[in-house]
Image (tube, rainbow, N blue to C red):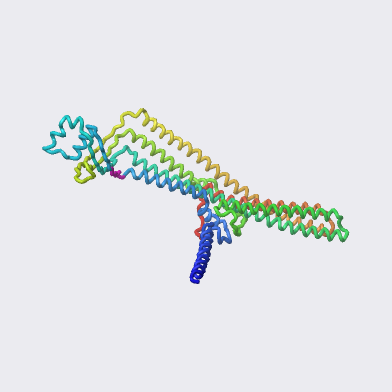
Amino acid sequence: MNKSKTIKITNKNADIFYLISIAILIMITAASKNAYAVGISNMSINKAFLYSLKYNKILKLESLKLNIAGYEENEALSGFFPKINFNETYLNTDNPLYAFGSVLNQKILTNQNVQSYFSPNFLNNPGMIHNYQSEFQIEQPLFMGGKIYFGYQRAQLHRLSLKKGLSETKQKVLYSVAKAYYSAILAHQYVKLMKSMVKTAKAYKKLAENLYKAGQVVSSDVLRAKVELAKVEEKLATAKKNYKLSKYFLNITIGLRVDSKYKLTSKLLPPYNKPLSIGSLQKEAFAHRPDYKALLLNKKNMSLGIKEAYGKFLPKLVAGYDYFSNGPAIHPNDSYSYAFTVMLHFNIFSGLYDYNNLQKSKSRYNTMIEYQGLLRNKIEMQVRKAYLQYKTYFMNTNVAKLAVLNAKQTLKITTNRFKAGMTTLINLDKTLDQYKAAKVSYLNALYKINLNKYYIKLVTGRLTAVPKAKP
């Protein structure tokens, strides 16, 4: 009886343990998922920027490169500090030179044994000599021709250059997010437009059927209305598919799970005439573009490389201190000694290696000068392109808006005429197509003018100001 009771309790404990394990597993699984994708209900363009700065995989890779540059800078800084080493060496030898040197280091010579150690018999055949040596070593470079100093400065410039590169990558990512975000909004607007087209096509189909019953139209008009409805429904299905794909692409661009769901809250805003000038935009670009700043840092780095190359022709001065402990056994009665050294090194001839290294450094600097000119031309061209696009898109948007109003009014008039039997369904369908085309053109114009706003910030290096708000 007691045995069965024990078994029952054990099974109950096992059940409890099993339930606890399942609960822990569920918690771990939930935590392992992208927590940032949970709880997103609304997604504005600014919130999309904030999420991308935190989760975009390209930015994570660039951040890791910047971390590596930071460690390289620390490595260069270590050249200013002394190098401290400790060595423990065991020597077992019958080499006459090493054996006699070990005896001297151990300081075991006395008046009684000096004759035996200096005898030809010992010097020629010392036998197996044991020596345990401990060495504490300090080495401090005093002057290395500027190698350490310029190396550290160049490492700093390299890190700052990569930091500017990270800033450039951030701006490119933000622009990609803006492009993907407004593409998703545009796709959503297409869905809304096609839904309204389906609703209108259904109304025209019903109207055609009623007019056919009243004997005002022929059966082919009813069939045509059905065909047009089917075409519009097919376009609606395509628009829905494209909207889903655009949302998936937006999630990937931001760095979220591809199936994250939320509502897009920003809109395609109508344009407003903002005063811009090419001169002011170019001035901003040269002051803020991170790639241009990075190039200037690299140019300075190459200039320091020339100075570092000249330093190879200068003498080097290094100081060192060694403290020794020697004994025939593991340090029971060691003898101690020290050595302080100062070394002055002249490189008289290196097979023209240093000379060619200097010329290579000069060539790299001249290359950066040419790259600077090319980048200036590229920035000037990008700024002009952004400026002209803004002017063109502004005019196109206003024209497209007027075209929509005109097409809407024409469609209303044609619909009334069709109801009165004054025109055919073919003309009504053409007018509906013209309204749809005008609406699509207006949406595309709004997309371009809204995206161009971020392109201007990108080419001027100012696509960084994200409101301080929690995602």
Residue lying farthest to the left in this orientation:
111
Instruction: Locate residue 189 relative to residue 287 in the image: left or right.
Output: right
Residue lying farthest to the right in this orientation:
215
| Any part of residue 346 in sight | yes
Q: Position of residue 35 (x, y in %)?
A: 53, 59
Q: Position of residue 201 (x, y in %)?
A: 76, 57
Residue lying farthest to the front in this orientation:
1
> Which residues make up the magenta segment?
81-87
Question: Does the magenta-highlighted stretch encompass residue 82?
Answer: yes
Q: Nearer the viewer, residue 124 or 86?
A: 124
Instruction: Locate residue 353 relative to residue 131 in the image: left or right.
Output: right
The rendered magenta stretch, by its main secondary structure, is classed as strand
Number of numbered discs: 0
Q: Nearer the viewer, residue 156 or 449?
A: 156
Question: Does the magenta-highlighted stretch encompass residue 172?
Answer: no
Q: Position of residue 263 (x, y in %)?
A: 61, 59
Residue lying farthest to the bottom in this orientation:
1
The correct choice, above or below, for 226 with respect to 297 in the image is below
| Any part of residue 288 in sight | no
Q: Nearer the viewer, residue 323 or 79?
A: 323
The picture quadrant where one finds residue 75 is top left
Instruction: Locate residue 331 relative to residue 442 in the image: left or right.
Output: left
The correct choice, above or below, for 18 with respect to 125 in the image is below
The correct choice, above or below, for 6 with respect to 336 in the image is below
Instruction: Locate residue 340 relative to residue 166 in the image: left or right.
Output: left
Q: Nearer the viewer, residue 20 or 411?
A: 20
Q: Position of residue 44 (x, y in %)?
A: 57, 58
